[in-house]
């Protein structure tokens, strides 16, 4: 075993930390209040190579490994998870999905601009009646010979309005159930697409979450990824890697809140001493640090397995489950350590707590992660 990072990995971590601590921090509170999409940050992160971190340089990506991706996601999420979820969806769902399973044409036409960050992508699986049970796809992709006719509604789509490219999961052969599902690359400006209003969310408020409606949208056959009926497996396999990104996001939210609580505990005085000198607070900090370190190991283990070409589905489910629960607990304790100041926006920890909650819900709820893990250990 080797616990050392490579020089390249440290450089990526440092670059993400610098950008987050210098730039994201400046307007994060204002964007949380206004829900404004962070377009200028996405552009800057694209220039730094963060929109295609793991994509092969052959397709204009940065060619880094999954461990580097985890390190970058942690640093960005310490400051602003609304920005890091845009990075995560683009990298581990959209770019990865096309790079791993797409055709040469799809890589040339779509992966290049996505990896350069000239456009961003969205992953459209969830529907009003298909969340945890993603087999219940009502969106249809009817085979019309040389094109598919797409009809239906997708819900909760991150980058829903800002994406240039959608990866849409849809049912082509209902009689085959989940084996009849396809995944199509759909250009945002295709005729027949309409986007619902921006969701007014509890947290990650400046990420761009919308419903997307398709009415008789024609999608060329060549835009189907993989064989006929591959869509459900595509979604499940892609989400295995997506969960490493969300686990790293949860880790970052937790460590961001912990760092603030640690600092505050050394400044705030009660009963004639800094609150860090009260054992109740010191022990909270010890528990927070321990859980964060465990979450970090989970994330890095899942990333390492993926980089080694070994199965990582259970490891990524464990990482997401543990890191998300850690984020929720650590951020709640960070608010507690700040007392009344923790309850107001200026001190950031209440926002981190709102952001943490989402990591227990999207890309598979914590309950769904337990189903994935228990199926594996009971098989
Ligand atoms: C802000 C935000 C962004 C999102 N971004 C995207 C996106 O970009 N693309 C996309 O496709 N989706 C996205 N989602 C959707 C997200 O993945 C779903 O919300 C999530 O999978 C849960 O589905 P649901 O909301 O329908 O809840 P449900 O599936 O209805 O679940 C409700 C509750 O029941 C529990 N439950 C369900 N089934 C079981 C079971 N078998 N055993 C035990 N408990 C169970 C769940 O854990 C949950 O607690 C996003 C969601 C949000 C809120």
Image (tube, rainbow, N blue to C red):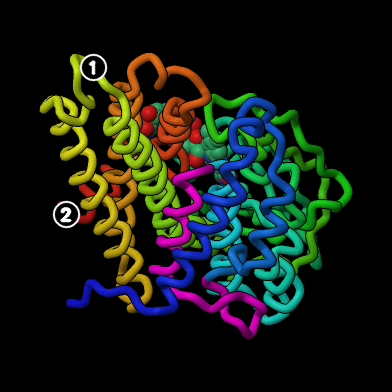
Ligand 1 within 8 Å of the CB at mark 1: no
The residue that label 1 is drawn on is: 270
Tell me where residue 356 sits by quadrant. Answer: top left
Left or right? Give the position of 53 relative to 303.
Answer: right
Of callouts 1 and 2, the N-terminal one: 1
Q: Few, some or many C-alpha atoms within 10 Å of disc 2 (few <14, some 14-19, many ≥20)?
A: few
Quarter of the picture holding the N terminus? bottom left
Write the residue at 58% across / 73% down: 99
Ligand 1 within 8 Å of the CB at mark 2: no
Q: Secondary structure at mark 2?
A: helix
Give the image location of residue 297, x and y in percent. 24, 59
Tell me where residue 204 sits by quadrant. Answer: top right
Write the residue at 40% across / 22% down: 342
**Front tag of 1 and 2:** 1
In the image, 270 versus 319, the foreground residue is 270
Whether residue 88 can be seen here: yes
State if disc 2 and disc 1 touch (CB < 8 Å).
no
Name the mark on residue 377: 2
Left or right? Give the position of 180 relative to 258.
Answer: right
Task: Kindly report the secondary structure that dominates the magenta region of the rendered protein.
Answer: helix
The magenta stretch is 54-80
Q: Secondary structure at mark 1?
A: strand
Magenta span has 65?
A: yes
Q: Residue furthest bottom?
A: 58
In the image, 311 versus 227, the foreground residue is 311
Q: Residue furthest right?
A: 191
């Amino acid at each position: 075993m080797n616990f050392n990072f490579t020089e390249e990995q440290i450089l990526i971590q440092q670059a993400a930390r610098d950008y987050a601590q210098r730039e994201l921090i400046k307007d994060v509170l204002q964007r949380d209040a206004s829900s404004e999409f962070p377009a200028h940050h996405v552009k800057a992160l694209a220039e730094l190579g963060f929109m295609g971190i793991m994509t092969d340089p052959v397709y204009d990506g940065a060619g880094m490994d999954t461990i580097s991706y985890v390190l970058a996601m942690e640093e960005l999420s310490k400051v602003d998870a609304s920005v890091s979820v845009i990075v995560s969806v683009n990298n581990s769902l959209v770019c990865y999905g096309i790079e791993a399973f797409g055709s040469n044409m799809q890589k040339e036409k779509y992966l290049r601009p996505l990896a350069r960050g000239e456009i961003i992508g969205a992953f459209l699986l969830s529907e009003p009646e298909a969340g945890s049970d993603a087999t219940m796809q009502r969106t249809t992709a009817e085979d019309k010979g040389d094109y598919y006719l797409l009809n239906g509604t997708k819900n909760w789509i991150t980058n829903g309005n800002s994406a240039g490219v959608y990866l849409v999961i849809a049912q082509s052969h209902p009689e085959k159930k989940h084996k009849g599902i396809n995944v199509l690359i759909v250009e945002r400006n295709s005729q027949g697409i309409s986007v619902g209003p921006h969701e007014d969310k509890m947290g990650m408020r400046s990420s761009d979450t919308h419903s997307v409606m398709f009415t008789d949208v024609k999608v060329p056959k060549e835009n189907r990824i993989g064989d006929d009926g591959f869509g459900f497996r595509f979604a499940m396999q892609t989400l295995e890697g997506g969960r490493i990104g969300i686990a790293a996001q949860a880790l970052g939210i937790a460590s961001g809140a912990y760092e603030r609580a640690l600092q505050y505990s050394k400044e705030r005085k009660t009963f004639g001493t800094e609150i860090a000198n009260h054992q109740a607070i010191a022990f909270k900090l010890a528990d927070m640090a321990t859980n964060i370190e465990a979450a970090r190991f989970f994330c890095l283990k899942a990333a390492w397995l993926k980089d080694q070409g070994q199965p990582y589905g259970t490891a990524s489910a464990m990482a997401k489950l543990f890191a998300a629960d850690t984020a929720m607990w650590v951020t709640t304790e960070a608010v507690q350590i700040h007392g009344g100041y923790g309850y107001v926006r200026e001190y950031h920890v209440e926002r981190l707590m709102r952001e943490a909650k989402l990591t227990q819900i999207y890309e598979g709820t914590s309950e769904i992660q337990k189903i994935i893990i228990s199926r594996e250990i009971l098989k």
